Image: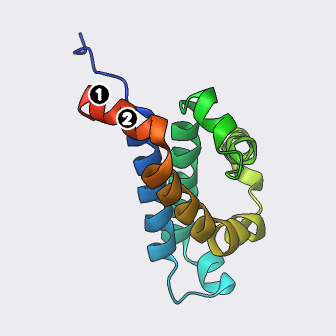
């Protein structure tokens, strides 16, 4: 029997999303698209990390998602569904676009949420998160 784990908070999930995004960026630092496509370990790790980001985003409260619609929550979830259910047909050009164009901006937005969302900060202080 598994021990009962306390569910992750919104803050913990946002931190996890940011961590995975940073890992993806680090995996692909100084790489070209051709490098990415031809390195199975890196593209596999990047795709896995995107899945983890999406899975964490699924459990972010609707209240946070509504207050912070600058993050493309629905698109992140949709990307995960396409990866999970159609793994053999992943378009690496789309994944590469996410890596290069979307993740740095998403990290900045998550940092801003973590620093400025008063309700999130007060909840964390109240609950010792």
* On screen, residue 49 above or below 2: below
Quarter of the image for residue 62 reads top right
Question: 108 or 91, which lies in front?
Answer: 108
How dense is the environment of label 1, judged by Cα within 10 Å: few (below 14), some, or many (20 and up)? few
Q: Secondary structure at mark 1?
A: helix
Residue located at (69% from left, 35% from top): 66
Q: Give the image's coloring scheme.
A: rainbow
Question: 110 or 76, which lies in front?
Answer: 110
Locate residue 7 relative to residue 37 in the image: left or right.
Answer: left
Q: Are marks 1 and 2 in contact (CB under 8 Å)?
A: yes
Residue located at (41% from left, 58% from top): 19
Residue 25 point in image, percent of width and height:
51, 73
Furthest toward the top, the residue is 1
Per the rendering, the mark at residue 18 is none
Residue 126 point in image, percent of width and height:
29, 28
Q: CA distance from mark 1 to mark 2?
A: 6 Å
* On screen, residue 108 above or below 70: below
Quarter of the image for residue 39 reads bottom right
Q: Which residue is mark 2?
A: 122
How dense is the environment of label 2, judged by Cα within 10 Å: few (below 14), some, or many (20 and up)? few
Locate residue 125 relative to residue 79 in the image: left or right.
Answer: left
Residue located at (28% from left, 20% from top): 5
Residue 99 point in image, percent of width and height:
62, 69
The quarter in which the N terminus is drawn is top left
Residue 97 point in image, percent of width and height:
73, 71
Q: Which residue is mark 1?
A: 126
Q: Secondary structure at mark 2?
A: helix
């Amino acid at each position: 029997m598994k021990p009962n784990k306390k569910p992750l908070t919104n803050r913990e999930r946002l931190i996890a999303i940011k961590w995975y995004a940073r890992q993806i960026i680090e995996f692909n630092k100084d790489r070209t698209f051709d490098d990415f496509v031809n390195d199975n370990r890196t593209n596999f790790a990047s795709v896995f990390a995107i899945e983890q980001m999406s899975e964490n985003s699924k459990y972010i409260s609707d209240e946070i998602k509504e207050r912070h619609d600058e993050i493309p929550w629905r698109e992140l979830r949709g990307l995960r569904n396409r990866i999970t259910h159609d793994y053999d047909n992943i378009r690496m050009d789309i994944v590469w676009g996410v890596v290069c164009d979307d993740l740095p901006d998403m990290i900045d937005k998550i940092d801003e949420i973590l620093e400025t969302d008063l309700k999130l900060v007060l909840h964390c202080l109240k609950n010792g998160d």
